[in-house]
Image: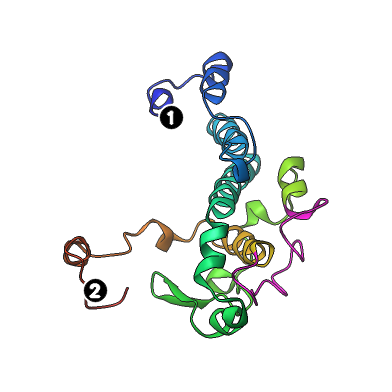
Amino acid sequence: MDQFHTRPDFEPERLEAFLGSLRPGPAEGDGQDLLKKAFRHYALARHEPETDARHEHMLLANLQVILHEHIRLQPHIQGAMPAPLRRLVTAHLLDFQVGPEELSVCEDIEGWGGAGAPVTLHKLENEDLIRFLAGPGGWDRTPNSYVSSRATNWADIRDRMNYIVDLFRCRHFDPNLFVAPHTADQCAELLRGRVPSGPL
């Protein structure tokens, strides 16, 4: 996508040429159809003057990229979690931090800063995004609600994505998402193959 950074005007032919360079087919078969959709929405977001519509394009593109990667990771995630222990691992071991905030995938998402989704993502209008979340085979069990957003089996991609789509919708503008996750010293320790001290 570097080829678009210095070109401020929307150039459909250039976009189609780039999309045509991606491998056709589903992610399960090493295809990049989801990435094609995502990059199209990133391009639309860049040239969309209306704020709500731009944010919906960005959210959908982000979720399509995430889904692509999680489909590819699915065999590895399943293989790393023995079937009898999957619910136990999900309930007790899958905690993480977003900035100073501690989250757990086994708990329902709570609105960032005590609020729900950003105002621009409260009422969705983008039909592709609505279909992705709530259409047949949609990835959000309870659209427009964080009730039942928690995961119970992280090895189940539908359960996992249900949590992720709510997390990304509600934290879309959380400034902590743009903060480096590790200090320079921690990065140096990781590169040496050591577990760094301090919050990770």
Callout 2 crowding tier (Cα within 10 Å): few <14, some 14–19, many ≥20: few
Main SS, magenta region, reads loop
Indicate the amino acid at tag 1: Met
Q: Which residue is mark 1?
A: 1
Number of marks in the rendered image:
2
Indicate the amino acid at tag 2: Val
Q: Nearer the viewer, residue 43 or 139?
A: 139
Instruction: Give the magenta part as a residue range.
Output: 133-156
Relative side of 157 to 143, left or right: left
Element class at badge 2: loop
Q: Nearer the viewer, residue 186 or 59?
A: 186
In the rendered image, is residue 48 in sight? no
The tag on residue 101 is none
Q: Nearer the viewer, residue 98 or 163?
A: 163
Q: Which residue is mark 2?
A: 195
Labels 2 & 1 near each other (Cβ < 8 A): no
